[in-house]
Image (spheres, rainbow, N blue to C red):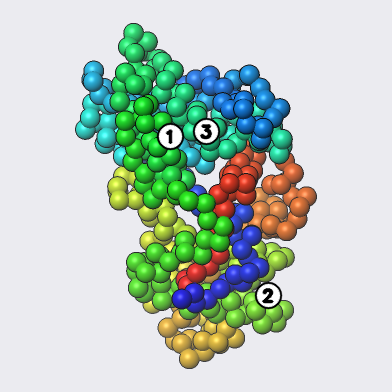
């Protein structure tokens, strides 16, 4: 059962390109000590090309690059393991809260181990090449990154602990990861069992999936019922308005969300469907849990207008709900739509974009900076996109919520 579509066919590519299956960086609470102040970064030199017999990596190279890692040995006692959190498709500094007080800190404390956050090649500062052209990105594969993981365990020398042999298999290594990095952890254990004693694969993605509409099904099935009901109905309202394509009504809808200058309807649909994606960033550990999904659900399921400035737009919201085919429920949906508009405007509106909205959210312009800038600084736009376009897929169109 697949319910509402939110321009499913039109937005399949745009939604995937901007979101795909990646967790958002953990956001520190105000009381937190910035973990970058606690854990300095270190580098280990690893081969750029581990597979000289594979033609897809030609032309081959014997050069090496600096792979960044962070570690905490404050819990270590001889005999303890090395617990390596693979940072996956993100800058490794975004995973440092897990070293500070999350799962890595807990495991290291419980086992007298060393906690490590290891960066994935082509993210953060760990670049094998000088730019991110398609030719340069040929070394960005899960296979090469897994070989980096193995090389790290065999060759690392932790600063200040040079007198100890803390390499595998002399010391038990355990790899941890979530989502893509969770699949990565499972692959590490499967391919390098002599180096990695164990693996913890959290929500591990172990299969390439092209059309991944099922991504949203757990949210529909297990999310807060009031939130999912409101989400389903509001998205259906938006779907119906966009599908009818009455220019005046569409413009009124975009204006309500603070996105009136956004040119393309599927870019608009991409943004307004983003709130429910915060589900992935929840965590069983309160110390590193993201509250974004709860904030979003609290907004759209509230019976009150939570943003005072939007109270004056009640008649507009009601007319949009009627235009979207849910006029018989304006009494219950109006405040939900107003809160959804306000929440989205606050997160993605003009104030959050340094320039015209199209410069931030347009997926149509092939000459946009996000596509044409091949510098290392643009890894957030290019590295993961290259991985899911060449290896993994995970194009997330809407399912039923």
Residue reaching furthest to the front: 53
Element marked by disc 1: helix
Which residue is found at the position 53% from the left and 21% from the top?
46
Pair 2/1: label in front: 1
Q: Which residue is mark 1?
A: 191
At 43% from the left and 39% from the top, the residue drawn is 187
> Is 298 displayed left or right of 397 in the figure?
left
CB under 8 Å between discs 3 and 1: no
Neighbour tally class for label 1: few under 14, some 14-19, many 20 plus, Cα within 10 Å: some
User: Which of the two discs, 3 and 1, sits closer to the camera?
Assistant: 1
Answer above or below: position of 307 versus 371.
below
Which residue is pictured at 44% across the width and 57% down the height? 278
Q: Is residue 69 above or below residue 23?
A: above
Question: Callout 2: 10 Å neighbours few (<14), some, many (20+)?
Answer: some
N-terminal label among 3 and 1: 3
Which residue lies under the disc numbered 2?
A: 251
Looking at the image, residue 333 sits to the left or right of residue 83; the answer is: right
Q: Give the Cα separation between the discs numbered 3 and 1.
A: 12 Å
State the residue in front, 144 or 355: 144
Within 10 Å of disc 3 (Cα), the crowding (few <14, some 14-19, many 20+) is: many
Can residue 375 be seen? no
Q: Position of residue 288 (x, y in %)?
A: 35, 45
- Furthest-right residue in view? 367
Q: Which residue is mark 3?
A: 145
Label 2 vs label 1: CA separation? 53 Å
């Amino acid at each position: 059962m697949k319910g509402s579509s939110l321009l499913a066919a039109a937005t399949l590519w745009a939604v995937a390109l901007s979101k795909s299956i990646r967790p958002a960086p953990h956001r520190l609470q105000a009381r937190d000590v910035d973990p970058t102040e606690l854990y300095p970064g270190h580098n280990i030199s690893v081969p750029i090309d581990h597979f000289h017999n594979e033609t897809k990596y030609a032309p081959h190279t014997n050069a090496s690059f600096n792979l960044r890692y962070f570690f905490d040995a404050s819990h270590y006692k001889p005999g303890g393991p090395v617990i390596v959190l693979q940072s996956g498709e993100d800058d490794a500094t975004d995973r440092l809260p897990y070293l500070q007080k999350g799962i890595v800190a807990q495991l290291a404390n419980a086992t007298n181990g060393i906690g490590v956050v290891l960066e994935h090649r082509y993210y953060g500062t760990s670049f094998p090449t000088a730019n991110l052209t398609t030719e340069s990105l040929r070394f960005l594969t899960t296979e090469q990154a897994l070989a980096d993981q193995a090389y790290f365990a065999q060759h690392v020398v932790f600063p200040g602990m040079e007198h100890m042999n803390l390499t595998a298999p002399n010391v038990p290594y355990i790899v941890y990861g979530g989502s893509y990095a969770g699949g990565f952890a499972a692959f590490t254990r499967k391919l390098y069992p002599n180096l990695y004693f164990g693996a913890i694969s959290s929500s591990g993605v172990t299969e390439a999936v092209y059309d991944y509409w099922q991504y949203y099904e757990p949210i529909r099935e297990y999310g807060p019922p009031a939130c999912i009901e409101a989400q389903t109905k509001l998205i259906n309202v938006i779907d119906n308005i966009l599908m009818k394509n009455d220019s005046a009504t569409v413009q009124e809808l975009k204006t309500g969300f603070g996105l009136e200058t956004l040119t393309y309807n599927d870019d608009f649909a991409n943004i307004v469907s983003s709130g429910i994606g915060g589900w992935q960033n929840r965590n069983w550990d309160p110390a590193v849990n993201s509250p974004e999904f709860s904030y979003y659900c609290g907004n759209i399921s509230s019976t009150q207008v939570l943003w005072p400035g939007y109270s004056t737009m009640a008649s507009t919201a009601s007319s949009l709900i009627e235009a979207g085919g849910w006029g018989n429920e304006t009494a219950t949906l109006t405040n939900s739509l107003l809160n959804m508009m306000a929440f989205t405007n606050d997160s993605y509106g003009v104030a959050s974009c340094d320039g015209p909205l199209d410069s931030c959210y347009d997926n149509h312009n092939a000459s946009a900076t996000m596509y044409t800038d091949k510098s290392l600084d643009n890894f957030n736009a290019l590295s993961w996109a290259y991985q899911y376009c060449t290896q993994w897929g995970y194009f997330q169109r809407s399912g039923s919520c």
